[in-house]
Amino acid sequence: MRLVIVESPNKTAKIRGFLGPGYQVAASYGHVRDLPMSGDLAVGFAGGRVLPKYLPLERAGHALANLRRLADQAEEVLLATDPDREGEAIAWHLAEVLGERRYRRVVFNQITKPAVTAALANARLIDRHLVDAQQARRVLDRVVGWLVSPTLRRLGKDARSAGRVQSVALRLVAEREREIQRFTAAEYHVLAATLQKAGVTPAFVARLAQWKGEPLGQRLIDATVAERTVEWCRKQRFVVHACDRRERDRHPPPPFITATVQQAASVRLKLAPDATMKLLQSLFEGGHITYHRTDSVALAPESIQAARAIIAADFPAKYLPKQPVAHAAKSANAQEAHEAIRPTHPETGLEGPETLDASQRALYGLIWTRFVASQMATGRDQITTLDVACAPGTWNGGPMGVFRAKGRVVLFDGWRRLTGDDTEEVAKKKARKKKAGPAGATDTPDAEEEQDVELPLLTVGDALDLIALVSEKKSTKPPPRFTQASLIKRLERDGIGRPSTYANILKTILDRGYVQELKRLLHATDLGMAVTDFLVSHFAGSFIDLGYTARLEDDLDRIARGEVAWEKTVTDASFAVLDLAQRAGLRGNPLAG
């Protein structure tokens, strides 16, 4: 008998059905041992070595007893935990706990018969570099918590703890809160002219972009000046100053990775990241999608062919590119992930298997749509920019004012035929405009905004009739608060933490009362502001800094590639935090010996 150990009991029956009678499949129920959450520091530092003192998890006792019994009967033990660093570490912990046996590591990123049987045929040894990277992360997270939390509690009993990544996420929210508190709205006015080439073109609207040879930029105009300018301009000539028409490609979006599917589910389905991760887990364990903790946008060749077959069958020929679409990874450290998140059986269509419940089906549909769209043809838009001179030749030989209009027309929708032009960024922009009014969420001049209208193709020097000229009163808006989706996007952009941890990070700062979510917007509480101020004042240059945290993530990736030793990285970082903690009031040296 060959024993296959997986993490979740929800996988066992399906995998057992793939393998037949010569195999037994059992679950570890996740991690089987870990560093303790509290108590004495369970990490030793001696002679340049790091000695973590792992303890068996109490909840894992029954599972371990069952695994030992089955392993005693097995000719070989196959460790088929999840295909990432965390899964590699769980496999290593299992090998350590179960004792001397013949172990092989099995990796598959989808629970289908071909994937599982192929993985068994290519079993390998445990990758210690991946294990060391996970150990380094775990030890550092614990050390930061152990060293910093006692100093933090000086703020009061509500300031319970700090974390290596959660504190940086909190800092982003708190600093945005400060920006909003400091913000003072300022009134400004935008001049909008309705213009037309008489008897030739339809009317269009252009807004004042330059005055006396200078761009208006963020310069504000008070009401009196605005009205005087309107009255003066109404008496002047308007002629075409410049007309630029060009085409712009709109490339298909890549398939989802962990961070982007959380953002999309938050924007489109109003799902919190932790709820999204639970649904993804259920879809993966059910064999419906590939592994959902990934930062790679790569697709297996057979899945690309499946997407192309769907496009060929359901869309006109022009929507199928001649060659498969290749998407570049955003991160240079996406080497350990196998594929992007995609359906395992895309031929079942947008609705997915009948066994899915409503929530699963909604998320599955999002994944299926993005997967197919990622292989569709590039869209093409026509962008027209019209500059209209007001009172040409009256200011240093040029116009006194320039009114600008920007229009966009879809020439070929391409992948948008399936998804619509509703990427997460577009959806959020529309939502902000709807809430904030015509000025949107920022004080960008409306003259620079691209409108979904077709502008006429005119010739420089064409005379235009002024149909109307009005002054639109507006006010600047504060920077927008983070949503869970936009905070995840910021963490991903800055390389802070791992996408698989974002849901838990957000849940932690919310549960601890450092951040409050109101109408889907994140507000730093007084406690969260106090915690951030304390950490910034005492731990600047360490884990609380965005750049430091991102660099440490790079170090962890280098450990995973076998380029640097994990113990030196952990030792240097740990003692640097210790030094700052002692300056902040920590007594003694918990890392000694």
Image: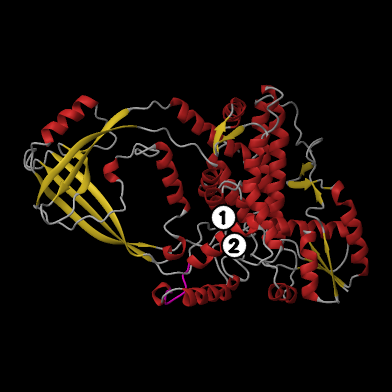
Q: Is residue 541 above or below residue 321?
A: above
Residue sitting nearer the eye, 445 or 471: 471
**Residue designated by label 2:** 341
Q: Is residue 168 shown left or right of residue 6?
A: left
Q: In which quarter of the view is residue 99 placed?
A: bottom right
Residue 83 can be seen, yes or no: no
Per the rendering, the mark at residue 14 is none
Residue sitting nearer the eye, 576 or 376: 376
Q: Residues within 10 Å of mark 2 (few under 14, many from 20)?
A: many
Q: How is the image coloured?
A: secondary structure
Percent of width and height locating residue 100:
88, 63
Magenta residues span 320-326
Identify the residue at image location x=88%, y=59%.
Answer: 98
* Predominant secondary structure, magenta span: loop
Q: Is residue 245 above or below residue 188?
A: below
Helix, strand or loop at mark 2: loop
Percent of width and height locating residue 262:
58, 51
**Residue designated by label 1:** 261
Quadrant position of the C terminus in the picture = top right
Q: Residues within 10 Å of mark 1 (few under 14, many from 20)?
A: many
480 within the magenta span: no
Label 1 close to label 2 by CB (< 8 Å):
yes
Mark 1 or mark 2, which has the lower sequence index?
1
Identify the residue at image location x=80%, y=67%.
Answer: 13
Amino acid at the residue labelled 1: Val
Residue sitting nearer the eye, 107 or 271: 271
Percent of width and height locating residue 276:
63, 51
Q: Is residue 438 shown left or right of residue 280?
A: left
Residue sitting nearer the eye, 470 or 545: 470
Q: Is residue 372 shown left or right of residue 402?
A: right
322 within the magenta span: yes
Amino acid at the residue labelled 2: Ile
